[in-house]
Image (cartoon, grey):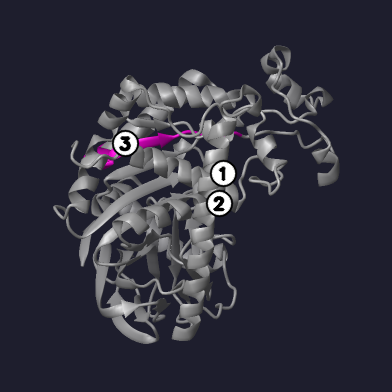
Amino acid sequence: MTGTKLGGALAASVIAAAFLAPACLAQSAEPEALRMTHEERVRDHDDREQQFRKRIAEAEARYRDEAARGQRPRSGVVSLGAVFGPTEESRARRALGRFLAALESYERGGRRGRFTILQIGDSHTAGDNWTGYLRERFQRRFGDGGRGMLAPGKPFFDFRPYQLRVAQSGNWGVYNYRQWAGTGIASYSIVGDKSTDSFEASMRGLKSFEEIEVEFVRQAQGGSFVVAVDGREVRTVSTRGAHSLERVSIPLPRAGHHATVTLKGDGAVALLSWSLLRRAGLVYVSHGVPGETVGLVGKWDAGIAAWQIHHLDPALIVVAFGTNEGFVNRLKPEEYEAEFRDRIQAIRGMAPNASIAVVTAPGADRLPSWCGRNRAQRERFQCRPLGAAHAAAYAELIEQRSKALCYWHSPPALEQVRQIQRRVAERLGVYFWDWSQVTGKDCGMDRWARMDPPLTIADRVHMRLEGYDLSGEALYRDLMRLYSPGRH
């Protein structure tokens, strides 16, 4: 068990949160029937394997189609993925140098154990469709290191992490960074004190784990929790003691498929995260918060976040924000540039041995809410780039609820955000990947929404599974294009 001392202010907030838990209840549903027989797992594995092979094939086909379409300017797609000239390729290799060298060492056997990629972002990351595709792609080449670190329990209704199913029951208090300072990179913590408080996860198909980690806060009146695997108790952990951050690692004698954490009911327990891991292989950890900006990094408890990232020891950190910043009607470019630079530097300070990849916002198109009462009416509006006059007076037109903006369009701040992120990335020497090169910029997501099948949902901001698969394929290919064993 590993730990670190916890500051007094945060320690006090843990105690307060523990007793507030019932009032902050966010989940109280009955647990789902997550456990499966071996025969059910085999069938689930076969079905999912067939589905994912089909997803890869379709994503590869769309990749080729979009790349060809990108040769025609009217498509709205400039190019798919990065097109490297000698200067750009050299800059990209330098920016990703530590990641590429570590990946080569790992693949050749010089680096043992697990190899971790960490991604943080907004709703595109939170949904885990895009990151789920990337996780599968990387693990199929470099080995399956497990699902990795997760927020504890089921912190929000639509929490559906890829590769497993989760459920939560009881009277947990679920807290994000707005409600309690004691959150790390998962951005959620849970607190409970009843013996009926539990949560569980079941791996899909034949996927399994060989080790469980649980991060928690030790406190003077802390209670205990029981970890069970496939119906058998494997460890009882007490959280009572001097205030500190603690991590318990539980290696298993044989691989497990279903894990449960249940409180003993003998005191308050505050949990920060848990991880389902294999002993070796690639781990793609992803944490996203819907509606967030890069400012999320400054809302974590810095001590907890640094402690967690140090333990993960990621070779690559993917920072994927920009969509929500791009919808700000009165963006202050200088302030945003300073904030973005500070957040990237803060991440670098917590992970000095990692490469950093900035992934900027994909395309996004907007139709103001007062334009059309229902979906059918809204679909009748066409998309076109903002004219200069509308762009110059955009904030005022939005505030006036002007019908002059009743057409699908890309918010003017979105491209500003991309250019700011690109500039900061270049100055700090980190890798920059322009997602809008995949989707297209002005009206690119509108085009995706009108495709058959559509690649984005009706809001022209969030993608369907097929759109995230194509995006994941593009990013994976660009990273692998730079990965040339023997050059590092």
Callout 3 secondary element: helix
- Please say whether residue 362 is one of the residues in the magenta stretch: yes
Give the position of the N terminus as an image quadrant. bottom left
Residue at mark 1:
62
Name which residue lies at 26% across and 63% down.
246
* Mark 1 surroundings: few (<14), some (14-19) or many (≥20) residues within 10 A: some
Q: Which mark is residue 304?
A: none
* Mark 2 surroundings: few (<14), some (14-19) or many (≥20) residues within 10 A: some
Q: Could you tell me if the residues under marks 1 and 2 are in contact, i.e. CB atoms within 8 Å?
A: yes
Q: Which mark is residue 58?
A: 2
Residue at mark 3:
482
Instruction: Specify the segment rendered in magenta.
Output: 349-363
Q: Amino acid at mark 2?
A: Glu
Q: Quadrant of residue 319?
A: top left
Left or right of 71 in this view: 7: left
* Residue 61 location (% of width, % of height): 54, 46
Residue 107 can be seen, yes or no: yes
Q: CA distance from mark 1 to mark 2?
A: 6 Å
Give the position of the C terminus as an image quadrant. top left
Using the image as rendered, state which of residue 337 and residue 389 is in the foreground.
389
* Mark 3 surroundings: few (<14), some (14-19) or many (≥20) residues within 10 A: some
Of the image marks 1 and 3, the number of the one nearer the N terminus:
1
Q: Amino acid at mark 1?
A: Arg
